[in-house]
Image (cartoon, rainbow, N blue to C red):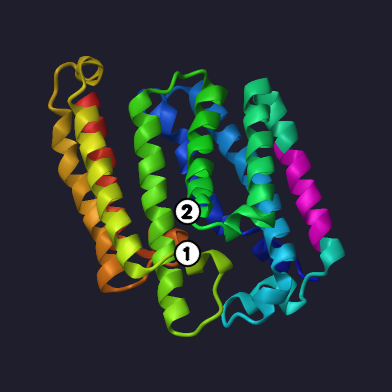
Amino acid sequence: MALRDVVTLLRPQQWVKNVFVFAPGFFAFRLGEGEVFAASLGGALAFGLVASSIYVLNDALDVEADRRHPEKCLRPLAAGTVSMREAAGAAAGCALAGFALGGLLGEEVLGLLLFYAILNGAYSLRLKHVPLVDVFCVATGFLLRIFVGGAATGIALSSWIIVMTFLLALFIALAKRRDDVLHAAAGRDVRAATAGYNLPLVDMALGVLASVTLVAYLMYTMAPEVGERFGGRPVYLTFPWVLLGILRYFQRTLVFQDSGSPTRIILSDRFLQGVLALWVLSFFFLGR
């Protein structure tokens, strides 16, 4: 067993999702405060450790199916470069470290991490095979990340952030299922839940979710409490970047038919990264 194989098993690239833990501090313009940033960072680290333990569990349960998959057969457990015993040790270590750190951040953070672990344990064992329920579980995982961020920092979450996060996460999860539908049509081995989806359903749902997400963001920028926080500045001017980002993801999904790995898209799509950077800059410019 090589250390590199263990690291690969833990999927550290998936930790990019934990940027959502920083969302409460970001939208409250308090990430610049040392205590808030440290608490957000601690929450992200704790969530990442617990999530990595769940990834190991998922790979252990799917090891036989992964060995038949053209890409997943390269995963450490499926390839045999990490044994089940070694994987169990790595998962237990990550889970214990994550829960311990979560406990240091407060009982609420620890409770949320435990709920995430239970939900995703159920997802790995059964729920990922149930169409529609599977994507709702994935979206709930993103929602729990912002709850952890709020609990760790003591920042109250607005209903707008909760709604927008869930809608966006559901959009991304369904875009990934669209990729599974395409693989199934090509005769490739895919998850059982894919049988409950087809392109008309997924494309319709993506259009609805994208529209509702954009409307929710626009309403957020025009909410009185947001206008007050920004000193009356036109926060809605950040809307074009959000629209452009959604359209770019749609392009990757419908035109390039490349939505199977949201993490890879975020880490490699320079256009999307540029749009996100411009959105953050415009947000801070209006809020200073």
Quadrant, the N terminus = bottom right
Gap in angstroms between the C-alphas marked 2 and 1:
8 Å
Residue at image position (43%, 72%) is 181
Other residues around mark 2 within 10 Å, as few (<14) / some (14–19) / many (≥20): some
Q: Which residues are magenta?
A: 87-98
Residue 192 lies, in percent from the top left, at 57, 68
Q: Which residue is labeled 1 in the image?
A: 196
Residue located farthest toward the right when viewing the structure as drawn:
85
- The three-letter amino acid code for the residue at tag 2 is Leu
Residue 264 lies, in percent from the top left, at 44, 64
* Along the line of sight, the residue nearer the viewer: 141 or 13: 141
Q: What secondary structure predominates along the stretch shown in magenta?
A: helix
Residue 248 lies, in percent from the top left, at 25, 59
- Residues under numbered marks 2 and 1 in contact, where contact means CB atoms less than 8 Å apart: yes
In the rendered image, residue 84 lying in the magenta stretch gets the answer no
Q: Is residue 12 left or right of residue 230?
A: right
Quadrant, the C terminus = top left
Residue 106 seen in this snapshot: no
Query: Residue 256 occupies which quadrant of the picture?
Result: bottom left
Q: Is residue 164 above or below residue 177?
A: above
- What is the tally of numbered marks visible in this picture? 2
